[in-house]
Image: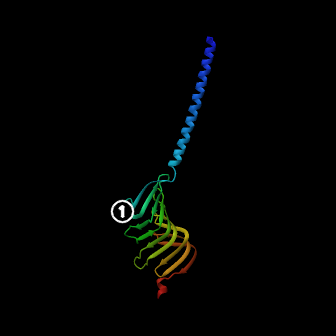
Amino acid sequence: MNQRAYDRMSATLSVGILAVLAAVSYYLAEFTNQFSELQRARNLGHEADYFVEKLSLTRMNREGQPLFRLSAVQLTHFADDSSSEFEQPQLVSLEPEKPLVRITADRGVASDDGDITHLHGNVVLTRAAQGDRPELQIRTEYAQILPNQEIARTDKPVRINYGDSSLTGVGMEFNNSTRVLNVLSEVTGIWTTPASKR
């Protein structure tokens, strides 16, 4: 074999080895990307990253005064959206100048910042009696709570008891700050005013 043929064969072999290395590198890079995407998808799945049993949390205002307390049998936190799920949650207002409001449910889901809480199953909102105002109780199967705005709302059927008065309807918004209660549709019941008791 002459030198020229040997050089040609070496060059061809070198190019072949480089082509194989390039192909292997490409497939390794593709495999790594696919594995990373799979790992990311797994990490972003709606899986719990921690849970707490028998918890009680108190939210304060900017002046350090308590606004409300949230307690639950168990809290489960999810990393993908930073949401929290609660078993048997209970929210209690803590502002002394306002009537005590207590909300209970079978379970709840709170957004990552706690600005919205969704309550499901046997939702009961009770505002304590104050002065000449009797106790108010609202029952429904779902409620959206906006604690910072002191608003509870639902698009589900509701039953409302206020002293001797009772109402049923579909859809409701209750604003504890303004003490305004709106039932949105299909309202039936008996509403007793102090004047009608005489």
Q: Residue furthest top?
A: 2
Task: Give the percent coordinates (x, y) of residue 156.
Answer: 55, 69
Side of 187 relative to 123 (left or right):
right
Task: Give the percent coordinates (x, y) of residue 147.
Answer: 45, 63
Residue 15 vs 75, above or below: the answer is: above
Label total for image? 1
- Indicate the quadrant where residue 32 lies: top right
Side of 28 relative to 99 (left or right):
right
Q: Nearer the viewer, residue 79 or 143?
A: 79
Q: Residue furthest left?
A: 64
Examine the rendering and report whether any part of residue 24 can be seen. yes
Residue 174 vs 55, above or below: the answer is: below
Q: Residue furthest front?
A: 1
Side of 152 relative to 94 (left or right):
right
* Disc 1 residue type (three-letter): Gln
| Residue displayed at 58% across by 25% down | 17
Task: Give the percent coordinates (x, y) of residue 158.
Answer: 53, 73
Residue 125 vs 80, above or below: the answer is: below
Q: Nearer the viewer, residue 53 or 197?
A: 53
Task: Name the colour scheme.
Answer: rainbow
| Residue displayed at 57% across by 28% down | 21
- Quarter of the image with the N terminus in it: top right
Mark 1 surroundings within 10 Å by alpha-carbon count, few (fewer than 14), some (14 through 19), many (20 or more): few
Q: Nearer the viewer, residue 109 or 5?
A: 5
Examine the rendering and report whether any part of residue 60 can be seen. no
Identify the residue under disc 1.
Answer: 65
Task: Give the percent coordinates (x, y) of residue 109.
Answer: 48, 61
Could you say whether the residue bearing mark 1 is in a helix, strand or loop? loop
Side of 112 relative to 2 (left or right):
left
Q: Nearer the viewer, residue 148 or 18?
A: 18
